[in-house]
Amino acid sequence: MGTILDVLTSKFLTKLGHLIEEEVVMTLTVERDIKRLKTNLEHFSAVREDAEALSMEDRRVEAWWKNMSNVMFDIDVIIDLVMVHSHKLLLPPGSLGCNQASVVSCFRKLSFDHKVARRIKDINEKLDEIKMNTEMFSLDRITRQQFQVTAVDRNQTSPVDELEVVGREIKQSIDNMVHMIIDSCHENRSIVLGIHGMGGIGKTTLAQKIYNDQKIREKYQVHIWLCISQSYTETGLIKQAIRMAGQKCDNLETKTELLPLLVDTIKGKSVFLVLDDMWKSDVWIDLLQLPFTRASIFHVLVTTRNLDVLAEMNATYTHQVNTMNYHDGLELLMKKSFQPYKQIGEFKNVGYEIVKKCDGLPLAIKVIAGVLSTKRTIAEWKSIRDSKWSIHGLPKELGGPLYLSYNNLPPELKQCFLWCALLPPNFEIHRDSVAYWWVAEGFVRKEHEFSIHEIAEKYYLELVRRNLLQPIPEFVDKGRSTMHDLLRSLGQFLTKDHSLFMNVESIDAMSNLRRLGISHAVEELPALEEQKCLRSLLLFNNKNFKSVHKDIFRKLEHIRILVLSGTSIHKIPESLGNLVLLRLLDLSYTGINKLPESTGSLISLEYLSLLGCHQLDSLPAGLMRLSNISFLQLEQTAIDHVPKGIAKFQNLYNLRGVFESETGFRLDELRWLPNLHRLWVSKLEKAIPVGELILKNSCNLKELGLRCTMSVSTHDRTRYEHDEVQIIQQVYDMLIPSPSLEYIFLVGFPGTMFPEWLRLKPELNMPSLQQMHLDECISCSDLPPAGQMPQLHFLKIQGADAIETIGQELLGKEVRSPATSFFPKLEVLQLIRMCNLKSWSLNTRSPCDNMEGNSQQISVMPCLKRLLLLDCPKLRALPEDLSMVVNLKRIHIEGAHELREVIDLPAVVWLKVKNNTCLRKISNLGKLQDLFAQDCPTLDQADNLCSLKRLYMVDCPHERDFRECLSEEEQGTLVNVVTTGADGRDIFPDESLYN
């Protein structure tokens, strides 16, 4: 699939070509050296495809590969420095202010030219030396096919499936361990149990299934899951334990403060604790064991690769996880390689042979399935089977399928995969964030029909599809994921010569360190002054990191990515302005109260996040000079004035938290931002209507968030007078989005009517809309006709205080038109905190419909799968026609105190009812398999629940009467769990486990 050198060489040649063409370079003394560098690089398009693999098997080749990589980094730096310098020379002649300044600039230019010429000459000499190793070049190499980004098929990005558990043996192991744990609970014994096995064999998956088993959830009052990475901190683990036990500890920082709170939280309660991925026993013995002895009973489940850990913890039982048998392995391979509707029979024989080469490791099978999912023919599958699987020099656990899955990536994706290995273990990778990191590193190749940020997001989805990133089940759009520790180790091994994630408080001697991630366990930033080649520095949530040396950025002039998110810093030094190559600066959730004035010198800066900087009250004036900004995040700050001039940021892709102020930013500046894809505007109560269609030129806009400031008090939701509301209404009316919009968020809208563009024929104004979020629109008495929108998949209505009925207005005023379907693609519907909602109807019929000739069949919500009704206390009944929604599988109803029955829902398989005061009856749910009921004091009637498999009843006093309503046949196959004393805590199993 090509080496990373391929994509780097191509990128550098393109950049050098542009430099040579620019007139400014013709005045530089380095023109001849740049042309020679370009000629030299053209030779490297013929580097052998197996060069990286050979470097792990042959020390001589390893040295060659290392030298080649270092030179490539140096070329990247020198090209960018020349481009930045060229940008400065192209500034208007009078920008320096006087002739004397021009003379100084001239001397600086001569000095810069001399330095650049010297550095390029050194690079060319190194390249000449590298070329002498002719064995590393292939004269007959075919030009590689570039990885092409295509529009993502929605069917291939469906919600994440349940945990991958296949095979009778694995399921039997789960049942056996659950019974063992429950038996010891009956005997009132506190024990430690272990799950042991090699990396990637499925220990965590097994523990997750046990942790979420309904019997375990019922037996214990407190359930805690702790992932013990090798870079854990004691305070971090204690905080996580406290939070999972149901308490808050945000204001506590020391172990002395946290341990007593942990003891108070679990004292006298039954506790089930999972310690996942234990490397040493001291986490338990020295830190957690003593506080957990204060529980009435505790059971600990440990996953580890090291049997000594379990012995030192006195584990009473150890389950050895064995490799998968070939039959189960083939089932997993086929499940992950094909879409359900594909014909797979003819591939099974080759698949069986591939499974054998995976040695029964589930992780290996899944990542190879990711490779096979890109292959369409048996011949391609055989090619993978016959590939070189073993690489000498790689640690055994990282070779074979794991390396093969990496090696089959296109070069663009190889860089992105390796970069993720720089992140902390078990780090939650956000699609939007990692896309910007990759763009800032220069990994993303521009294509004509997509923006560079869209391409980066598609790179992310491709790594998820190939099982190299593991999506988190709670996020159905796969927007957040993690990297398995073995894949992370593979990435770190392949980048060990230039990148480091630091767990300890010292850096090994590395003269050419390029990328550095620092664990939250490191208390003090190490001395970095000698790491002059550093280009990425990442710190996440390191509360021990409190200051930055004032001169450090004078030494680190090559940095492109600087992430200090969640650290305890309060000041950024003026030396920040020296980072002329800096493209991404993330200071989110820090305690800074101002940015240095030198921020205006960061002429390469593209990404600036100040999210959650609650002490930051102003922006430096120089910020408005940074014309390359494409992402600006200002939400959750104390800023009361956004400077005028946002319109100068012509590359803006994502703008969040901007608002009008008297002498600063104005909404009409948005008219001059044609590349804007995502926009969130805050404090719209401060905006002044201008009578123009502000977003009419935003033809690429995909996401729009409009927010007014609302009071948090339920009795004083808005402080706006009538005249103010009228002005706000006018402001919203002029914010007509473009037809390209896919996501709309209205938060805190105080108007009495929704904006006209949402109220009247929104299907014409926003034909591509996929998600609609209406939050705290407290005064609107009618909902928009969302049922007419052809692409809407997700609808949330929250805090609409004025809504008393939902009827035909939501479907659309033309319900008796020739339309045959309303909400044709809606999959998820959420109604939350609708405090005055009394009735809801999906009825599309009129009195005339019974007349001859008006018998047209109308479909309502044919694709709806999930319904959430939360805190709708006055809702008396579900819509009668909800029974006609043929694909509705899951319903969650909580806080509907006037609701008396849930009946006639033939498609529903999963139902949760909680804290519904008057609910008495659940009937005619013929496909219902899982029923979870809690705090329903009058629930006592059941009928026709013939498919029920699992019944959970928590704090329901009439549970016996309810069960007696079930037939003997239903009771005979039922897993029945009854408990009391939950005090409102939700102890149900994770919903994602039930599909």
Image (spheres, grey):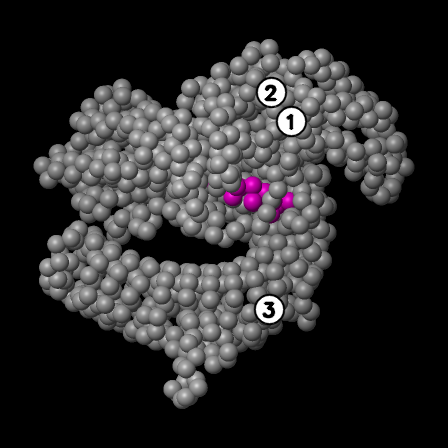
Residue 459 lies in the magenta-colored region: yes
Residue underneath mark 2: 51
- Residue situated furthest right in the rendering: 99
Crowding around mark 3 (Cα neighbors within 10 Å: few <14, some 14 to 19, many 20+) is: some
Instruction: Name the residue type under label 1.
Output: Leu
Disc 1 and disc 3 in contact, CB within 8 angstroms: no
Q: Which residues are magenta?
A: 452-464
Q: Secondary structure at mark 2?
A: helix
Checking the image for residue 5, the label placed there is 1
Residue 765 lies in the magenta-colored region: no
Give whichever of discs 3 and 2 has the lower sequence position. 2
* Residue located 54% across and 74% down the image: 759
Checking the image for residue 765, the label placed there is 3
- Front one among 750 and 41: 41
Give whichever of discs 1 and 3 has the lower sequence position. 1
* Residue located 59% across and 42% down the image: 456
Q: Secondary structure at mark 1?
A: helix
Instruction: Name the residue type under label 3.
Output: Asn
